[in-house]
């Protein structure tokens, strides 16, 4: 069971990712293309944990993008991994339900 602190930290990390994407027009465009969202849908989507998990999936799926985010925000990759795990839920190989 995830604690409230982990969930809050994960949401804060996801918010930082969204803020960073907003400053990177090419990266934001790539994310929107891959997610199928339009820019005007982002405000509504931020309340959806599935959206936040998908945004972190986007970062986690391309190490250079992850490292660019970390360098720009001084957030450690481990914090992104932790947030990604907290928002994505257990994987098939985790042994968790």
Image: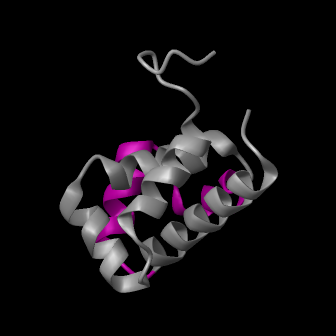
Which residue is nearer to you in this view: 34 or 66? 66
43 part of magenta stretch: yes
Q: Which residues are magenta?
A: 23-46
Rendered location of residue 86, percent (x, y): 60, 44
Side (left or right) of 94 relative to 68: right
Q: Is residue 95 visible to the viewer in this orientation of the structure?
A: yes
Residue at image point 49% right, 44% down: 54
Residue at image point 58% right, 32% down: 89
Residue at image point 43% right, 71% down: 21
Side (left or right) of 58 relative to 12: left
Quadrant housing the C terminus: top right
Q: Majority secondary structure of the magenta segment?
A: helix
Tell me which corner region of the image, top left, top right, bottom left or bottom right, holds residue 43. bottom right
Residue at image point 58% right, 50% down: 52
Q: Is residue 37 visible to the viewer in this orientation of the structure?
A: no
Rendered location of residue 35, percent (x, y): 43, 44
């Amino acid at each position: 069971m995830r604690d409230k602190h982990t969930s809050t930290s994960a949401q804060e990390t996801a918010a930082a990712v969204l803020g960073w994407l907003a400053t990177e027009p090419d990266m934001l465009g790539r994310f929107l293309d891959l997610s199928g969202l339009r820019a005007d849908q982002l405000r509504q989507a931020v309340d959806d944990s599935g959206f936040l998990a998908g945004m972190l999936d986007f970062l986690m799926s391309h190490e250079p993008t992850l490292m660019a985010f970390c360098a720009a925000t001084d957030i450690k990759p481990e914090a992104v991994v932790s947030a990604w795990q907290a928002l994505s839920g257990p994987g098939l190989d985790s042994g968790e339900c």
